[in-house]
Image: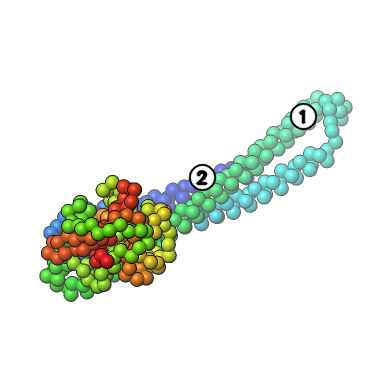
Amino acid sequence: MVKKIIFFTILFFLVIFSIQAQDNQQTTDLQKKINEYQTKLSQLSQQKNTLSSQIQYMDTQIYLTGLQISVTEQKIVETEKEINLLGSRIEGLDQSLDYLSKQLIKRIVEGYKKRPFSIFSLLLDNKNANDFLNQVKYLKTAQTNNQKLLYTVQETKTNAEELKKLREEKKIELDKQTEALNYQKQSLNNQKVQKQRLLADTQNDEKVYQNLLAKAQAEYVAIQGIIAGAGTETKLKEVKKGENIASVISGASCNSSGGHLHFIVQQNNTVVNPFDYLKSTNYRNCSGSSCDSGDGDPFNPSGNLDWPLSPTIELSQGYGSTWAVRNTWVGRIYSFHNGIDINGSSNSVLAVADGTLYRGSYALGCTLSYTKLVHKDSNISTLYLHTYTQ
């Protein structure tokens, strides 16, 4: 029985290794393709920014995500096979453990049924020295076999426990792989949607696309200029927290196609994450592929400043390396979003703190108007772009 357990344990791991070797080869082949298309994607990003090159970039990105999905699906199949094999092996060890335990109990019971003996009783009960030696040898062999059986029971139990632990780890791994697969499939769908949206926005026309790029580039340059202090600013008055200081411009305004507040926080003249300063509030996250899609930018306020707009806040783009930067053509213009784009329940802009109010503008083809608030007794300033000051 012991030899069978050892044999099947070795066979089990040989099967596992064989499956892993086959699956690993398939995964390696897919990974080579992924590396190839990642290089191609990088090369495309360096090409002249035309509509055709952008579409080619998107098609390559879509194909690359498809390859990544195939790798994850292969890993899921591999993990499921391992879990099933572990389940079969655990079941076999449990049956072996049950059998061995019964045999051990049976031997223990038989041992207790025999009367206690001593050297003198063995001498008296056996007719000659040969019988005596045979009896001693039998008893010693029985004791040794019982010890071996006990060791086998313990070893089988340990092996079963280790395999059960490994199976639980594989189940956790499978859950993570499944979660990753769902995210990748969602990304693939988003990429396809963005391609269709770009074609619709540009009417598949190069001139329209270049016009969109020019407007986005001009707005980016204007925002960078405002942050650097190059805007034209006029001091207005001292204001209190919560006071109405401006209004969001409805509709398009200077290269912006839709009304929104581009809110920036500066500390010691350095742009910082607004979420680190704003307090929690009711919100709707529309910064991803669609509103409340779950793939948008983080909305994680952790400060104590009131919001510049009345809730419910609608986030259209977050701070930093945003979903739009990673998934749309705006990533050709900038790689880091230096504020947050939001809308509220009204267009009224509120002072987030006591301070000095300024009216500002920056001209570059068109005039980007903004409001600036220098916080009182603080090294913090807040900028409110695409607004007109009250």
Q: Residue placed at 26% from the left, 52% from the top?
A: 35
Q: Which of the pair 319/174 is nearer the observer?
A: 319
Q: Which mark is residue 136?
A: 1
Closer to viewer: mark 1 or mark 2: 2
Inspect this view and state whether residue 89 appears.
yes
Mark 2 residue crowding within 10 angstroms, few (<14) / some (14–19) / many (20+): few
Residue 105 picture quarter: top right
Residue 202 picture quarter: bottom left
- Judged left or right of residue 319, residue 329 is left
Q: Residue placed at 12% from the left, 64% from the top?
A: 365
The local secondary structure at tag 1 comes to: helix
Q: Residue furthest right?
A: 124
Inspect this view and state whether residue 54 appears.
no
Q: Residue furthest front?
A: 237
- Judged left or right of residue 258, residue 184 is right
Query: Is 113 placed above or below 31 here?
Result: above
Quadrant that contains the N terminus: top right
Q: Which of the pair 374/347 is nearer the observer?
A: 374
Mark 1 residue crowding within 10 angstroms, few (<14) / some (14–19) / many (20+): few
- What's the amino acid at mark 2? Ile
Q: Which mark is residue 9?
A: none
Q: Residue placed at 22% from the left, 71% from the top?
A: 252
- What's the amino acid at mark 1? Val
Q: Which residue is mark 2?
A: 10
Residue 348 picture quarter: bottom left
Q: Residue placed at 32% from the left, 54% from the top?
A: 355
Q: Which of the pair 282/379 is nearer the observer?
A: 379
